[in-house]
Image (cartoon, rainbow, N blue to C red):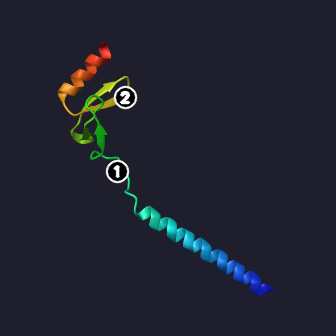
Amino acid sequence: MYRLFLIIGLLIMLFLLLKSLYRSSKQAGRPSRPPLDGDQMVQDPVCGVFVPRKTAIVQQVGGISNYFCSQECAAKFQEQRTS
């Protein structure tokens, strides 16, 4: 009887080990998220171009930061807001 419990316990441990190995190998293939620093890419709301956050033109509107690729896109955004 004890052998049966021992075998079942070992099989459960083996199952859990294989399951954790499968999950870790599955997650290893996923790309990691970019760090939230100045090199993060942000999307221009006007033209849709992605630019690095540290080189983007920033305008605060209602407490929300909007990032633009150029002064022209920032001006278009302001025109769209006022009209």
Q: Residue 69's x, y, as percent?
A: 21, 34
Q: Which mark is drawn over residue 17?
A: none
Q: Quadrant for residue 16, please give it.
A: bottom right
* Type of amino acid at the residue the image marks with label 2: Ile
Q: Quadrant for residue 19, please give it.
A: bottom right
Question: How many numbered marks have been drawn onto this rendered protein structure?
Answer: 2
Q: Nearer the viewer, residue 12 or 53?
A: 12
Q: Residue 80's x, y, as percent?
A: 29, 18
- 2 and 1 marks in contact (CB < 8 Å): no
- x 30%, y 39%: residue: 42
* Disc 2 element: strand
* Type of amino acid at the residue the image marks with label 1: Pro
User: Which quadrant of the figure contains the C terminus?
Assistant: top left
- x 31%, y 26%: residue: 60
Q: Indicate left or right for 1 with 14 as reference.
A: right
Q: Indicate left or right for 32 with 3 as reference.
A: left
- x 45%, y 62%: residue: 27
The residues bearing labels 2 and 1 have C-alpha atoms spaced at a distance of 21 Å
Q: Residue 77's x, y, as percent?
A: 27, 23
Q: Which residue is mark 2?
A: 64
Q: Which residue is mark 1?
A: 35
Q: Quadrant for residue 25, please give it.
A: bottom left
> Vertical placement of 40 versus 79: above or below?
below
User: Which quadrant of the figure contains the N terminus?
Assistant: bottom right
Q: Residue 9's x, y, as percent?
A: 69, 78
How packed mark 2 is, by other alpha carbons closer than 10 Å (few <14, some 14-19, many 20 or more), is few
Q: Indicate left or right for 11 with 46 as reference.
A: right
How packed mark 1 is, by other alpha carbons closer than 10 Å (few <14, some 14-19, many 20 or more), is few
